[in-house]
């Protein structure tokens, strides 16, 4: 019996060593390789944290150089001030933290928040194999893991943590807020409900059993092919070159992901996209089912002219009580809220929302 216990303990120790080793193997780029200029008002650093599946996630952390009310204090990670409100940012779906999420995080840091922009599991600089997979469960967990990290950061007051989910990560943010009461305030921007679009197609175009059966058959055939070949076929990122009959919103995506405005070498949307079977589980795992039980404030932001506006309106209808707000930006399309080339991202509104609710 003693020998069995000893062997079991040794195995547990070995597993723990392997897990710790795996959490330190990410290859993080140290130079500034964002699609936006670096702010002189914040300090930037690379950080990592792991989720409950043991996947290590990579993030850019932005810390205000001056704590509001304490002018002249240059904040660095070795100063113990557990006082800052914090925000975790992720999205869009298929993007990386060097794109839109980083823009939002840096702007919020300029306004007095400690903010992180992270790459979800299986993408960007984060861990997880095989690459370019997505999961309603794991990607919701990625947000909760970011809250774990922020809750234990010496600069952050644990009771003052919010999240921002952009595009497809808006749905994951709402799902996370419905699950984790440590999230005190949630913002979604230009959100997609990835479960709804997988189940119904755009504008309900495939919202019938026959269409869903055809999609299941296609996924099943692809899974067999992938297993046989030992590789995962990619679905392709944003189409390039653009066909003449491309929908206008696809042209908007192209103008961001495929041009110097927003292209990034690690972005799936800028390159070869998700795996064909990478997003299949969204079809029958609805993200927003428990949204009506969110007790904390939620601000939903969308463009008036965005093709995706109905996703935010649908999410807003699921929220209950007086803790919800829908802000429609006049004239804005979906990608206007990616990088603010149209000057429409409501940073002032987000700042006041978080400051009011992360007291």
Image (spheres, helix red, strand yellow):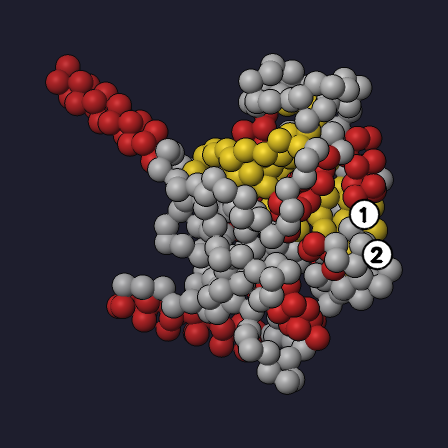
Label 2 CA crowd tier, 10 Å (few <14, some 14–19, many 20+): some
Residue drawn at (48%, 69%), measured in percent from left and top?
Answer: 236
Find numbered disc 1 in the image and state the secondary structure of the residue it sits on.
Answer: loop
- Name the residue beneath numbered marker 2: 329
Evaluate whether residue 167 shows in this view. Answer: yes
The residue nearer to you, when weighing 334 against 263, is 263
Pick the quarter of the image with the N terminus: top left
Question: Is 248 drawn above or below residue 343 in the view shown?
Answer: below
| Image side of residue 157 versus residue 137, left or right | right
Q: Position of residue 104 (x, y in %)?
A: 68, 44
Tell which residue pokes out farthest to the right in this image. Answer: 330
Q: Where is residue 203 in the image (x, y as percent from the top left)?
A: 70, 71
The number of callouts visible is 2
Find numbered disc 2 in the image and state the secondary structure of the residue it sits on.
Answer: strand
- Name the residue beneath numbered marker 1: 346
Evaluate whether residue 313 shows in this view. Answer: no
The residue nearer to you, when weighing 83 against 206, is 83
Q: Position of residue 295 (x, y in %)?
A: 74, 35
Question: Is 58 drawn above or below residue 76 in the view shown?
Answer: below
């Amino acid at each position: 019996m003693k020998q069995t216990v000893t062997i079991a303990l040794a195995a547990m120790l070995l597993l723990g060593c392997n897990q710790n080793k795996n959490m330190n193997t990410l290859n993080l780029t140290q130079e500034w390789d964002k699609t936006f200029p670096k702010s002189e008002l914040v300090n930037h650093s690379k950080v990592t944290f792991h989720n409950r599946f043991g996947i290590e996630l990579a993030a850019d952390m932005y810390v205000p150089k001056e704590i509001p009310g304490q002018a002249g204090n240059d904040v660095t990670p070795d100063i113990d001030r557990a006082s800052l409100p914090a925000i975790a940012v992720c999205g869009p779906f298929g993007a990386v933290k060097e794109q839109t999420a980083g823009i939002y995080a840096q702007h919020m840091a300029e306004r007095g928040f400690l903010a992180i922009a992270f790459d979800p599991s299986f993408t960007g600089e984060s861990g997880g194999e095989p690459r370019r997979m997505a999961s309603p469960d794991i990607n919701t967990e990625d947000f909760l893991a970011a809250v774990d990290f922020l809750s234990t950061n010496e600069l952050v007051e644990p009771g003052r943590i919010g999240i921002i989910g952009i595009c497809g990560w808006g749905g994951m943010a709402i799902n996370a807020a419905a699950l984790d009461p440590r999230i005190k305030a949630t913002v979604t921007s230009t959100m997609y409900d990835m479960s709804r679009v997988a189940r119904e197609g755009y504008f309900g175009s495939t919202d019938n059993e026959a269409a869903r059966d055809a999609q299941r058959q296609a996924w099943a055939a692809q899974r067999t092919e992938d297993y046989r070949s030992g590789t995962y076929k990619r679905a392709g990122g944003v189409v390039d070159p653009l066909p003449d009959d491309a929908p206008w919103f696809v042209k908007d995506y192209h103008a961001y992901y495929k041009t110097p405005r927003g292209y990034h070498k690690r972005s799936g949307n800028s390159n070869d996209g998700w795996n064909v079977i990478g997003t299949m589980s969204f079809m029958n795992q609805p993200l927003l089912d428990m949204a009506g039980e969110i007790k904390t404030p939620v601000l939903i932001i969308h463009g008036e002219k965005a093709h995706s506006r109905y996703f935010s309106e649908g999410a807003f209808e699921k929220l209950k009580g007086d803790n919800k707000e829908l802000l429609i930006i006049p004239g804005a399309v979906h990608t206007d809220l990616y990088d603010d080339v149209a000057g429409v991202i409501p940073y002032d509104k987000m700042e006041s929302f978080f400051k009011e609710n992360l007291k």
